[in-house]
Image (cartoon, rainbow, N blue to C red):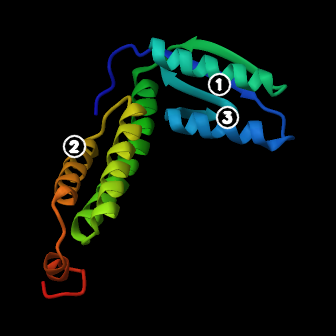
């Protein structure tokens, strides 16, 4: 993973009142779903593009609506080392998510699921992969493995499961 040269970041410096806790939790969940880099308490950053800027503007509006404070900034790191480290931090977080998803897909592919469960599982795996990819600004090598594992699991889950096939599936209680 190599960060692109001269990344411009959009940063949000914010503070949400402790009570009521619902807006604070909603802001935290939204920031987590966006895959922000946590620079400190109440300071987050994303590589700037129209989409990320709009998302952080939306979060800032929610913070202000909850009676908090929010400041959006455009920033650049002063050293290449800091830029690379920030990108690595974000890539490591996504790498862990991809590893977890690949493991989950592998387990789903090995277990014999009935047709309804298989369809729901395939849909959930594809949705989870898309969610991680949306917040993946500096793709780690683990992304390719997760894509492969989800594709294989979805392909296997699409195949009709017969009672004989379920019994012969390794780990399903039948002969290997």
- Point 39% across, 46% down: residue: 128
Q: Residues within 10 Å of mark 1 (few under 14, many from 20)?
A: many
Image height of 157 relative to 7, above or below = below
Q: CA distance from mark 3 to mark 1?
A: 7 Å
Which image quadrant is residue 119 in? bottom left
Asked if residue 41 lies left or right of residue 160, the reply is right
Q: Residues within 10 Å of mark 2 (few under 14, many from 20)?
A: few
Name the element at disc 1. helix
Where residue 135 appears, as percent x and y from the top left, is 43, 33
Q: Residues within 10 Å of mark 3 (few under 14, many from 20)?
A: some
Q: Earlier in the sequence, mark 3 or mark 1?
A: 3
Where does label 1 land, which residue?
59
Asked if residue 71 lies left or right of residue 127, the reply is right
Q: Which mark is residue 3?
A: none
Where does label 2 land, which residue?
144
Where residue 133 appears, as percent x and y from the top left, is 35, 35
Q: Are marks 3 and 1 in contact (CB under 8 Å)?
A: yes
Placement of the C terminus among the 4 image quadrants: bottom left
Image height of 108 relative to 136, above or below = below
Image height of 21 relative to 115, above or below = above
Q: CA distance from mark 3 to mark 2?
A: 30 Å
Where residue 155 appears, as percent x and y from the top left, is 17, 53
Asked if residue 14 lies left or right of residue 156, the reply is right
Which image quadrant is residue 173 in? bottom left
Q: Earlier in the sequence, mark 3 or mark 2?
A: 3
Where residue 98 appears, as percent x and y from the top left, is 34, 48
Which image quadrant is residue 117 in? bottom left
Residue 62 seen in the figure: yes
Name the element at disc 3. helix
Where does label 3 land, which residue?
27
Q: Earlier in the sequence, mark 2 or mark 1?
A: 1
């Amino acid at each position: 993973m190599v960060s692109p040269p001269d990344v411009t970041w959009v940063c949000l410096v914010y503070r949400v009142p402790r009570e009521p806790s619902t807006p604070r939790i909603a802001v935290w969940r939204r920031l987590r779903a966006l895959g922000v880099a946590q620079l400190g308490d109440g300071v987050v950053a994303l590589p700037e593009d129209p989409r990320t800027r709009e998302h952080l503007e939306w979060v800032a509006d929610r913070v202000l609506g909850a009676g908090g404070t929010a400041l959006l900034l455009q920033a650049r790191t002063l050293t290449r080392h800091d830029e690379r480290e920030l990108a690595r931090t974000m890539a490591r977080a996504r790498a862990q998510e991809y590893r977890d998803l690949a493991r989950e897909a592998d387990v789903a592919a090995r277990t014999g699921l009935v047709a309804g469960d298989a369809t729901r599982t395939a849909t959930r795996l594809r949705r989870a992969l898309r969610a991680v990819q949306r917040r993946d600004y500096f793709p780690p090598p683990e992304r390719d493995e997760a894509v492969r594992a989800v594709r294989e699991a979805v392909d296997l889950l699409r195949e009709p499961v017969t009672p004989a096939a379920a019994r012969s599936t390794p780990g399903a209680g039948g002969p290997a």
